[in-house]
C-alpha cells in the first residue's frame, strides 16, 4: 500500500500515470507470488486491522463529524460508520478471502490435438484493477483483498467522506503487505479527492485493465460513459418475479414476499411482480395483504387493481424503475410469452425469477430471459456472491462480455491458452 | 438474410438503427431455435452456395474487373478472388461449423448451496454481433455460420471491393435461412459502402453486443478507437520465440525456422527471435543459414551480429514491429528474466514461445509471460482456432476480458447464472 502526498490539481494526470506505472510493475511481480504468500499477506492485513481498532475508530469519528458538519444524510452517515461489529466483519472478510481457493494458474481442458500438441487454458490475473467507490470504507478492505488474492494490483479511489477512515485502513494494508514482503504498490490509494483523478484512472488502458465502479447509478453511468478501460458494472436492478398459472400458490406467495420485502435497498430486490391472469385472483389478494401489512406501496396495472383496490395506478415509467424502497409495481399478464417479453423489454438484465411447477416453462424461462441471473422457484434475493458460493463479490455485472452476474475472484482473472509440444512445428 | 435498397447518405444512421432493431428481434427468436434447426439452416446455406457456383463466379469476376480498373494490388486481388477451390472450402467450412458441438445451453458447475438452492452457469448467445471486414468475400460465409451456430444474429459489413460477391453470397444465405424457416434478419448485410455505416454500427450498444473487426491494423485501430460497443480484437502480432540455454538444439532450430518461415503473413508468425547468450554460438549460425537460404532478412543486436555477420543492425523500432514479411529481428539475451522482460515490454500479448528442456523455466514462462497464447517447445504458428480444436475462428483476441486467444463459437457466447429452488426464500 502506497500513499504519496496529495498532488496539486495541475499535476493530477502525471500523478495518476505514476500510480499506473507502479501498479504495472507490482502486477508483474505478483505473477511470481504463490498462493501461500498471498494468503500470508491477507492474514497480516487482518492482524494489522485487528491491532488498529482504536485508530480506526478515531479516524472514523473524524469522518462522521465532518460528514455531520457537511450535512450528510442519515443514510450516508450510516454507510460511513465503522462500528466495532463492522470492523469485526471487515477483518473476518479478509480471512474469508484468504480461505477461498486461488483461481490463478488453474489449467482447464488440457488435451492433445491431432498435430500432437497439447492445448489448455490457464487462469491468470487481469493485471491492474481500478476500483471507484463511495462512502463505505469497508469496501477498501474488501476490494484490496479480492484483488490481492486474484493476483491483481489495484488502485482504489474511495469517497472523500471516508478519507480519514480509508487512510487508516490503507496504513494497515500497507503494513500487512510489507510484513509479507509484497510490493507496496500492490494496493494503492488515490491520495486526492479531486474528481479529475477519476477521469484519469478510467482513461489509462496502458496501465489499468478493468474498472469496477461501486456506488450509485450516477457514479456508474458517469464512469461507464467516459471510460476507455473496460468497466465491470450494472446500472439498474429492475428485477422481476413472474408467477405462472402453473405455480404452487404457497411458494409463489413466499417468493413474492421475500423478493420484495426481505430488504428494500439491494439491487437484486424485486421491483415488478408479474402474475398470470388465470391465477391472479388467487395470488394477488394474499400477496397484497402481506405488502399492506409491511407498508409496501403497490402500483398496479388495471387488472391488478381489480383485485387490489388500494393499489395506485402504475405508469409506464413504473415498469422501468428501480425503487430501492418499499414500493412494488404489479402487472397481470395474459401468458408466459407476455411475461418474458415484459422482462426482456423493461428489465435491466439483472435477476429475474419464475414460479412454476411446469418443467417446460421453467426450461423456456432459463433460455429466453436474457438476464445475468435467471431463477426458478426461488427468491431474486439469492443473486449474490456469497449465496452463489463465490465468496465475497467485487460487484454484480450485467455486461454480456466477461463476467456476468455476481463477480468474485474468478471474474478478476482471465484465461490464456497454454500449449505444450516436444519440438512440434506446423506443416 | 436481408438486403434492402442502398440508403441515401443522409439516412445512414436511421438505416443502421433499423438493421439493429431487426437484429434484436431475430436474436430473441434465435433463443428459441434448437441445435437441429440451426444445423439444418447451415446445411441449407451450404446447398444454396453449392447450387450458385456459376452466379458466384460471375459476381466475383465483376468484383475482380472493377478491382483491376481501380488499381488494386495483386495481393488484394488475390484475396478477393473466389476460385473453385475457395468456393469448395467455403462450403466445406459451413458444414464443418454445422458439425461442431453447440455451446448454447450448456450448464456447468450446477451444485447445491447451503441454503438449498442449486446454482450453475449456462452458456447463452451474446445477442447481436457486428462484423467489419475487408476484401475476402469468404469471411461473409464464415462469420455468418459461426454467429448462426452460436445463436447470434449478425450484421456484416464487408469491403466495397467485394460488393458483388458478397451480394450473391448474401442471397444464398438468405435462401438457406428461409429454407430452414429462420428469420431473414438472422444475418443482415449492410447494403451501403459508405464509411459512415461503420461509425453507426460500432456506436449502437442498444442493438449490438460486440464488434469483431477483421482486417488490417488501421481498420482495427479505427474501430477500437471509436467504438462504444465492446470490440473483440488484436492489433499486432509481435510474436517471440525464446531459445533458452536449456533448449534441445534441434527442436530450437526447427521451431525458429517454422515459426518464421512457414508463412510470413499470419499474425502468429514469429517476428523476434530471442536467444540465451550461452547457446547463441550453437543456435545462431544454424538458424541464420536457414534464414539466408530462404531469403529472410535478419536484423540483429550487436551480440547477434558477432555470430551472423550479414545481419543488419536492429533498431529499437524493430523490437516492436510486426513485419508480416521475410524479415526477422534477433536479440541475444543474458538470461531467462531478460527474455521475459523483453517479451512483456515489446510484445503485443499475442503468442510467445519458449524452447527449453527445463521444467521450472517452462512453468515460469507460462506464468510470467502475459500473452493470449503461451507455448512451450512448439511453433507459434499453432495459435489458431483449428489447431486448438475450436473449429473455425471468428478472430484472435488479445483483449484481457472475455475471449483471449483464438475466438471460436464459445467466444461468441456468454454465461449467465441459473438457479433452481423449490420455493426457497432468503433469510
Image (cartoon, coloured by chain):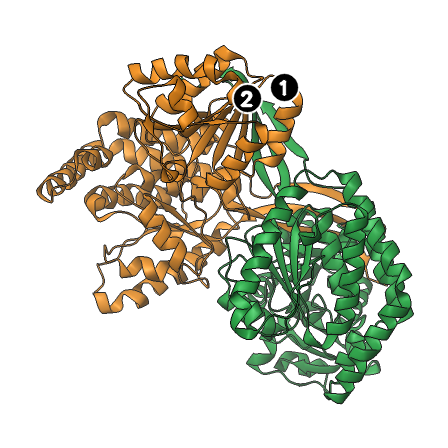
Chain colours: A green, B orange
Q: Position of residue A97 (x, y in %)?
A: 79, 50
The chain letter for the residue carrying disc 2 is B
A404 with respect to B381 (left or right): right
Residue topped by disc 1:
B358
A91 with respect to B415 (left or right): right
| Residue B101, numbered label | none
Q: Position of residue A284 (x, y in %)?
A: 74, 75
Q: Nearer the viewer, residue B201 or B174?
A: B201
Instruction: Compare marks 1 and 2 and give the one earlier in the sequence.
Output: 2
Q: Position of residue B92 (x, y in %)?
A: 36, 28
SS type, badge 2: loop
Q: Nearer the viewer, residue A358 or A144?
A: A144
SS type, badge 1: loop
Q: For the residues marked 1 and 2, what is the alpha-carbon distance in whole angstroms?
A: 9 Å
Task: Please report the residue visible at 67 percent of the width from the left and 24 percent of the height from the top.
Answer: B360
The chain letter for the residue carrying disc 1 is B
Task: Please report the residue visible at 23 percent of the width from the left and 26 percent of the height from the top.
Answer: B84
Task: Please report the residue visible at 67 percent of the width from the left and 53 percent of the height from the top.
Answer: A185
Name the quadrant of the C terminus of chain B. Answer: bottom right
Residue topped by disc 2:
B244
Amino acid at each position: 500500500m502506497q500513499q504519496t502526498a496529495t498532488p496539486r490539481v495541475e499535476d493530477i494526470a502525471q500523478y495518476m500515470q505514476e500510480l499506473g506505472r507502479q501498479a504495472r510493475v507490482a502486477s508483474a511481480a505478483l505473477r511470481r507470488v504463490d498462493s501461500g504468500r498471498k494468503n500470508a499477506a491477507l492474514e497480516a492485513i487482518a492482524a494489522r486491522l485487528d491491532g488498529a481498532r482504536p485508530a480506526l475508530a478515531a479516524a472514523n469519528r473524524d469522518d462522521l463529524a465532518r460528514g455531520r458538519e457537511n450535512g450528510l444524510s442519515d443514510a450516508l452517515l450510516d454507510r460511513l460508520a465503522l462500528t466495532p461489529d463492522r470492523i469485526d466483519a471487515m477483518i473476518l472478510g479478509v480471512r474469508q478471502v484468504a480461505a477461498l481457493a486461488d483461481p490463478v494458474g488453474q489449467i482447464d481442458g488440457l488435451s492433445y490435438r491431432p498435430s500432437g500438441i497439447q492445448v489448455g487454458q490457464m487462469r491468470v490475473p487481469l493485471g491492474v484493477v481500478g476500483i471507484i467507490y463511495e462512502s463505505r470504507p469497508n469496501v477498501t478492505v474488501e476490494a484490496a483483498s479480492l484483488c490481492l488474492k486474484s493476483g491483481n494490483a489495484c488502485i482504489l479511489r474511495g469517497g472523500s467522506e471516508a478519507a480519514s477512515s480509508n487512510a487508516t485502513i490503507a496504513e494497515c494494508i500497507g503494513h500487512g503487505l510489507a510484513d509479507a514482503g509484497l510490493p507496496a504498490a500492490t494496493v494503492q490509494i488515490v491520495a486526492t479527492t479531486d474528481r479529475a483523478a477519476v477521469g484519469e484512472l478510467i482513461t489509462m488502458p496502458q496501465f489499468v485493465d478493468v474498472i469496477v465502479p461501486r456506488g450509485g447509478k450516477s457514479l456508474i453511468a458517469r464512469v461507464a460513459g467516459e471510460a476507455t478501460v473496460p468497466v465491470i458494472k450494472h446500472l439498474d436492478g429492475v428485477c422481476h418475479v413472474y408467477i405462472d398459472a402453473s405455480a404452487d400458490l404457497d411458494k409463489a406467495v413466499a417468493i413474492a414476499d421475500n423478493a420484495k420485502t426481505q430488504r428494500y435497498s439491494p439491487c437484486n430486490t424485486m421491483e415488478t411482480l408479474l402474475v398470470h391472469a388465470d391465477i391472479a385472483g388467487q395470488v394477488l389478494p394474499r400477496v397484497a395483504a402481506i405488502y399492506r401489512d409491511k407498508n409496501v406501496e403497490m402500483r398496479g396495472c388495471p387488472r391488478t387493481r381489480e383485485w387490489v383496490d388500494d393499489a395506485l395506478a402504475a405508469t409506464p415509467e413504473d415498469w422501468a424503475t428501480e425503487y430501492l424502497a418499499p414500493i412494488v409495481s404489479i402487472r397481470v399478464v395474459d401468458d408466459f410469452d407476455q411475461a418474458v417479453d415484459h422482462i426482456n423489454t423493461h428489465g435491466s438484465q439483472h435477476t429475474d425469477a419464475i414460479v412454476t411447477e411446469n418443467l417446460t416453462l421453467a426450461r423456456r424461462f432459463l433460455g429466453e430471459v436474457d438476464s445475468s441471473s435467471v431463477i426458478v422457484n426461488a427468491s431474486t434475493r439469492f443473486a449474490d456472491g456469497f449465496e452463489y458460493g463465490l465468496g465475497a463479490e467485487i460487484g454484480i455485472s450485467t455486461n454480456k462480455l466477461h463476467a456476468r452476474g455476481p463477480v468474485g475472484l474468478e471474474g478478476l482473472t482471465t484465461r490464456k491458452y497454454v500449449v505444450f509440444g516436444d519440438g512440434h512445428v506446423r506443416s
